[in-house]
Image (cartoon, helix red, strand yellow):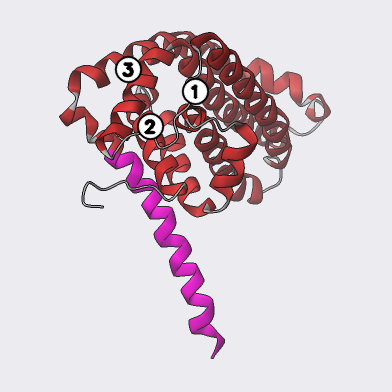
């Protein structure tokens, strides 16, 4: 008798998660409706991706040296045990770099491309009636506040990533469960980061946007995880970044109970 009651919340959570994924897909639709604006949004992402890509490829190139550095305890083990441990360490290092790198990339790109992404976000909101109760925030104070908030989120991702790195050494759990947890945490941080601009237009800061997104966490996670996974694909971060900004405007409106369809 309890099965239907348990199944209903699970189904609702899955639906809301998929709704969040759909918000990113709707953001991608802007490429068709506003190709010029979206292509402008690729420019800052491309600049940032060049720098982060070079750093990541350097990590991959020297990953064997790094794995030896972080596993000194395995020096006296048998060849097989040492090799397996260091392969796991290499995978965990790359996963740590992926989590911190994606969150950092988003933070830096949003700062570099602030005028472009602000325009994209506003265009989405204008399509559905504009921003209710918009406040006039001067550019430099807004940039300082968004930069400080982004740095806090990046700083938060580092200890979380280190914890997942250590958990990555646990057999099976580290290879199957930890990547899923990493994607969820990374997705949440991206969702909180990307909705910054539309929340600032409403005079709301980091604490408020966290609270609002927590009220419908599955939808925020669906959006954020979809963005996170796209950002892990080569060139995905460059091409998807403008769409992620557009989707974040939709996520903001939905989370605040504002219309995201022209029929409402």
Q: Quadrant for the N terminus, please.
A: bottom right
Residue labelled with disc 2: 244
Spot occupied by residue 122 in the image (x, y as percentages of width and height): 34, 27
**Residue, x 75% and y 23% (percent of image)?**
70
Our reading of the magenta stretch's main secondary structure is: helix
Give the answer, above or below, for where 255 lies relative to 91.
below
Q: Quadrant of residue 40?
A: top left
Spot occupied by residue 148 in the image (x, y as percentages of width and height): 64, 18
Spot occupied by residue 92 in the image (x, y as percentages of width and height): 63, 33
Question: Was residue 8 drawn as part of the magenta stretch in this picture?
Answer: yes
Q: Between disc 3 and disc 2, whose residue precedes?
A: 3
Q: Quadrant of residue 26?
A: top left
Q: Quadrant of residue 36?
A: top left
| Residue range (magenta) | 1-26
The answer to whether the residue labelled 1 contacts the one labelled 2, judged by CB atoms less than 8 Å apart, is yes
Residue labelled with disc 1: 106
The answer to whether residue 147 is visible is yes
Residue labelled with disc 3: 41
Q: CA distance from mark 3 to mark 2?
A: 10 Å
Relative side of 28 to 182, left or right: left
């Amino acid at each position: 008798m309890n099965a239907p009651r348990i199944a209903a919340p699970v189904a609702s959570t899955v639906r809301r998660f998929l709704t969040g994924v759909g918000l990113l897909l709707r953001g991608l639709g802007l490429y068709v409706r506003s190709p010029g604006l979206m292509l402008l949004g690729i420019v800052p992402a491309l600049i940032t991706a060049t720098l982060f890509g070079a750093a990541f490829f350097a990590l991959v190139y020297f990953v064997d040296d790094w794995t030896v550095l972080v596993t000194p305890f395995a020096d006296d083990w048998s060849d097989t045990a040492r090799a397996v441990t260091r392969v796991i360490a290499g995978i965990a290092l790359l996963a740590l770099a992926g989590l911190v790198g994606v969150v950092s990339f988003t933070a830096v790109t949003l700062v570099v491309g602030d005028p472009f992404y602000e325009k994209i976000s506003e265009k989405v909101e204008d399509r559905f009636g504009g921003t209710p109760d918009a406040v006039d925030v001067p550019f430099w104070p807004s940039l300082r506040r968004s930069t400080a908030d982004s740095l806090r989120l990046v700083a938060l991702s580092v200890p979380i990533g280190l914890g997942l790195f250590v958990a990555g050494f646990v057999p099976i759990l580290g290879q199957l469960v930890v990547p899923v947890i990493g994607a969820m945490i990374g997705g949440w941080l991206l969702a909180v980061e990307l909705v910054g601009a539309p929340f600032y237009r409403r005079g709301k800061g980091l604490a408020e946007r966290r609270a609002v997104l927590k009220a419908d966490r599955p939808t925020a996670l669906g959006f954020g995880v979809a963005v996170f996974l796209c950002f892990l694909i080569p060139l995905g971060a460059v091409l998807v970044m403008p769409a992620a900004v557009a989707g974040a405007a939709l996520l903001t409106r939905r989370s605040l109970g504002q219309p995201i369809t022209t029929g409402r």
